Image: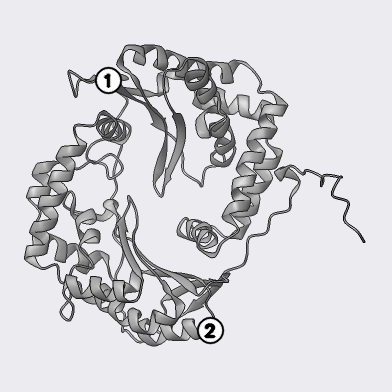
Amino acid sequence: MTLNRTIPPPIHDAVEFDFKLPPINNVQLDNGLPLYWLDAGVQDIVQIDFVFPAGLWYEQKASVAQATAALLKNGTQSYTSAQINEALEFYGAQLKTNAGNDYASISLYSLTKHLPALLPMVAEIIMGASFPAHEVEIHKRNAIQKLLVSLRQCEFVANQRIDALLFGENHPYGRFSRIEKMEALTREDLASFFATSYNLANAQLFMAGKVSDTEVKLINSIFGSIALNKSAIVRAEFSTPAMTERVHKVSNDPNGVQGAIRIGRQFPNRHHPDYTPMVVLNTLFGGYFGSRLMSNIREDKGFTYGIYSSLQPELNGGSMVVQTETGREVVEQAVKEIYHEMNVLCNEVADEEELLLVKNYLLGGLLGDLDGPFSILQRWRTLILNGFGEEQFYNNIRIYKSVTPAQLQALAQKYYSVNDFYEVVVI
């Protein structure tokens, strides 16, 4: 059959596609450690994540979780920081560490063929990071200097303040870095947190790329042979403060020409039935470049280069925050327009054509996420760490496709009441 190039191919909306989440393998290593892995790559590369319940939620002393994660690869009994970095550079690999609100992760990116050389070193880091005193002091000096620079930026201060207002400064989700807390950190603090929170028995392993049973056996030979000492994960309970004064104005730079705006409220996490339809409503409101907020405040008013609304789900709650930076002379007008767009969504049903555009945007982005092994692994990791299976993925797709303008209006009326939001303006 000859292809007629004068006839364009048919264009299909993303809502017409069937979505398929590639399955993930779930195996237990010889010592019971769970490993989730998928072979979805064409290049000889692999990502391996070691995830621990070692986020800010578990720290007994402020700033210790992030400092511990940052210094994990700065020395063991057998390797100095320089030797670890030289080995990673020699093999063209990366070892990234991160501590979030709930979890901390150690992620290795490497050519698959170099795993036999790299994984023993990673195992030693996980089992015996040493936190040399001089490395701790260097980290503290660098972190304090970075914080001093960041505190001069109104958007950084605004991010700190909105989280503290939503959850309270003593809550892990509202806690923020302070110089005096960083200065008070000791090597012993980090070593103690590492010993309790980076217990391999409480870890979950994730692997994706061009991998097979060979790599699974390799991981089992190294990590499955380690004797595990299972310990209970102690999760402290935190309460959030009752709502006080809604509007907070902060003078951060008397000579500043720009103001940072943050408007937020608490919002349920992924387990709440309103979360997934709110993803659609939030996208329409301020979640992408064609959103209501962007069209009004950037395109029509010219107050900002960009404005976004985002949902920030955590294991024990979450938030919804609108964020933008504008010229200081139009800050109040921008705030007024944000609330105006909330009211419009409460009082008027969205247009079907506009909603279809939002659905196609969400589902089109999802199609892109299912195109590579690392992004597929990230989607599975999010599901698993939140206690979901693949049925949650397909339930989300169903809601994205079927949610109606009337349902979104009801959702807006439930969650876009102006009096439920905190407002922070930093200039």
Q: Which residue corresponds to mark 2? A: 213
Q: Residue at x 23, y 66 (%)?
A: 72
Place of residue 119 in the rendered image (x, y in percent of width and height, measured from the top left): 34, 79
Q: Nearer the viewer, residue 247 or 150?
A: 150
Residues at circles 2 and 1 in contact by the CB criterion of under 8 Å: no
Q: Which residue corresponds to mark 1? A: 248
For the C terminus, the image quarter is top left
Category of crowding for the residue at label 1, using alpha-carbon neighbours closer than 10 angstroms: few (below 14), some (14–19), many (at least 20):
some
Place of residue 304 in the rendered image (x, y in percent of width and height, measured from the top left): 41, 22
Q: Does residue 188 show up?
A: no
Q: Residue at x 63, y 17 (%)?
A: 348
Sequence order check: which comes first, mark 2 or mark 1? 2
For the N terminus, the image quarter is bottom right
Label 2 secondary element: helix
Place of residue 147 in the rendered image (x, y in percent of width and height, measured from the top left): 17, 42
Q: Nearer the viewer, mark 2 or mark 1?
A: 2
Place of residue 266 in the rendered image (x, y in percent of width and height, measured from the top left): 40, 33
Q: Amino acid at mark 1?
A: His
Q: Is residue 247 left or right of residue 267?
A: left
Q: Is residue 115 above or below residue 193?
A: below
The quadrant where residue 47 appears: bottom left
Q: Does residue 141 show up?
A: yes
